Structure formats: structure tokens, C-alpha cells
Amino acid sequence: MSLSDSVLVLIDCQNTYTRGVMELEGVQPALEEAAALLDRARSAGIPVIHIQHDDGPGSLYDIEGESGAIVDRVAPRDGEPVVV
């Protein structure tokens, strides 16, 4: 297998896991690693797909609100698909 056969899939890198009742232990180091991997994938021209959980308006996963948004440092660029 070569890099030309590769795709990077980032799943649920959302703000809701960075604070409050849903904060995950170790989330900041995990996001740092995800950001580094994302930079390498983009530099190598590897396609990137973002997966974002949506639980509807007012929920902790509301993609229209801050908590459900993808963390800025791993946010999609123009042309990178987001699957909800």
C-alpha cells in the first residue's frame, strides 16, 4: 500500500470533549497529535474526511453551536468533506 491509497479520517474532534461535563481525560494531547497528523496528511496531499456528531439544536453536539463545532486546530479546510 502507498500513500496514494490513503485517506485520513478524523472522527468527532469537537469542542464538547474539551470542557465541561463531556471533557475527556487526555483530549488536549490527543488533539495535538491529530493536528500534527492532519498537517502531515495535507502536506502529502492525502485526502482528509471529517466526521462530526450532531445531536440536534441545544444539545452538547449541536453543530450550529460552539460545543458541537470541530476544534479550530483540526477544522476542515475548503474542499475537505464533513460527514454528519
Image: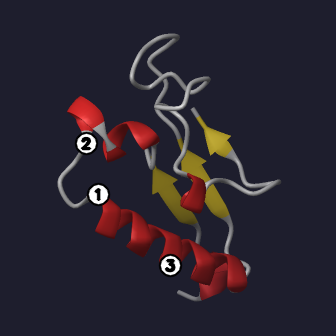
Whether pointer 1 and pointer 2 mark residues with C-beta atoms closer than 8 Å, the reply is: yes
The amino acid beneath tag 1 is Val
Residue beneath disc 2? 23
C-alpha span from label 3 to label 1: 14 Å
Residue beneath disc 1? 27
- The answer to whether residue 60 is left or right of residue 24 is right
> Residue reaching furthest top?
57
Front position in the image: 12 or 60: 60
SS under mark 3: helix
**Image location (x, y in percent) of residue 62:** 50, 22
**Image location (x, y in percent) of residue 70:** 54, 44
SS under mark 1: helix
What residue is at 60 percent from the left and 38 percent from the top?
83
Sequence-wise, the earlier of marks 3 and 1 is: 1
What residue is at 61 percent from the left and 85 percent from the top?
3
Dot 1 alpha-carbon crowd within 10 angstroms: few under 14, some 14 to 19, many 20 or more:
some
C-alpha span from label 2 to label 3: 21 Å
What residue is at 61 percent from the left and 78 percent from the top?
39
Sequence-wise, the earlier of marks 2 and 3 is: 2
The amino acid beneath tag 3 is Ala
SS under mark 2: loop
**Image location (x, y in percent) of residue 44:** 69, 86
Dot 3 alpha-carbon crowd within 10 angstroms: few under 14, some 14 to 19, many 20 or more:
few
In which quadrant is the C terminus drawn? top right
Residue beneath disc 3? 36
C-alpha span from label 1 to label 2: 8 Å
Whether pointer 3 and pointer 1 mark residues with C-beta atoms closer than 8 Å, the reply is: no
Compared to 38, does 58 lie above or below? above
Front position in the image: 6 or 49: 49
> Residue reaching furthest right?
78
